[in-house]
Image: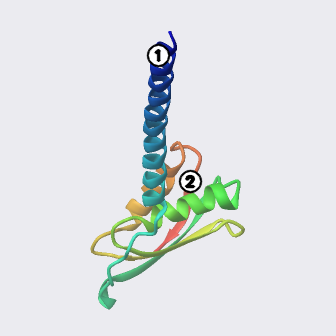
Amino acid sequence: MKFTKIIATFAIAGLVLVSCKKEEDKSMALIKAQAEKEAPKEHKAIAAENVQTASFEIEGMTCAMGCAKTIEKELSNLDGVEKATVDFDKKTATVVFDKTVQNQENLTKVVQATGDGKTYKVLNAKS
C-alpha cells in the first residue's frame, strides 16, 4: 500500500510539472510574439528624390495611448515609411515615406482599418 502511494505521488508530481511546463511554454510564446509585434521595424534609407511627407487630420481618436499610439505604430510598421507621428492633442498625423513604395491612399486605408473601419476617419490629407 505504501509503495502504491509513493508511485501515485510521483505520478501526480510529474503530471503537474509537465502540465505547468506546457502552460509556461505557451505563455512565453505569447510574450515573444507580442514583443516582436511591438518591436520597432528597421527602416531602409529612402533616396532623397523619393521622400514625401503626408499630413492629415484623424477624427475619432479618444485617447493618446490607445488610439494615437496604436495608429502611429501601424503607420510606422508599413513598408516604405521612414517615420510616422500622431499628435493626439492636435488630432493630426505626419508621415515621411518613400513615394515609390507608399501613397496617401494606402496611409488613409491603414488609419481607417486600425479601428473597426468606422472609428477613425482621415480628413484634409496633404502630400
Residue 69 visible (yes or no): yes
Asked whether 86 or 69 is in front, the reply is 69
Query: Circle 2 sits on which residue?
Result: 121
- Residue at 38% from the left image edge and 74% from the top image edge: 42
User: The C terminus is located in which quarter?
Assistant: bottom left
Badge 1: residue crowd in 10 Å (few <14, some 14–19, many ≥20): few
For the residue labelled by badge 2, is the local secondary structure a helix, a strand or a loop? strand
125 relative to 34, above or below: below
- Residue at 42% from the left image edge and 48% from the top image edge: 29
Mark 2 vs mark 1: which is more N-terminal?
Answer: 1
- Residue at 56% from the left image edge and 58% from the top image edge: 70
For the residue labelled by badge 1, is the local secondary structure a helix, a strand or a loop? helix
> x, y (%) of residue 92?
61, 68
127 relative to 78, above or below: below
Q: Quadrant of residue 88?
A: bottom right
Residue 108 visible (yes or no): no
> What's the amino acid at mark 2?
Lys
In the picture as drawn, the residue positioned furthest to the left comes out as 100
What numbered label is drawn on residue 17? none
In the picture as drawn, the residue positioned furthest to the bottom comes out as 48
What numbered label is drawn on residue 3? 1
> What's the amino acid at mark 1?
Phe
> x, y (%) of residue 104?
41, 66
How many numbered callouts? Answer: 2
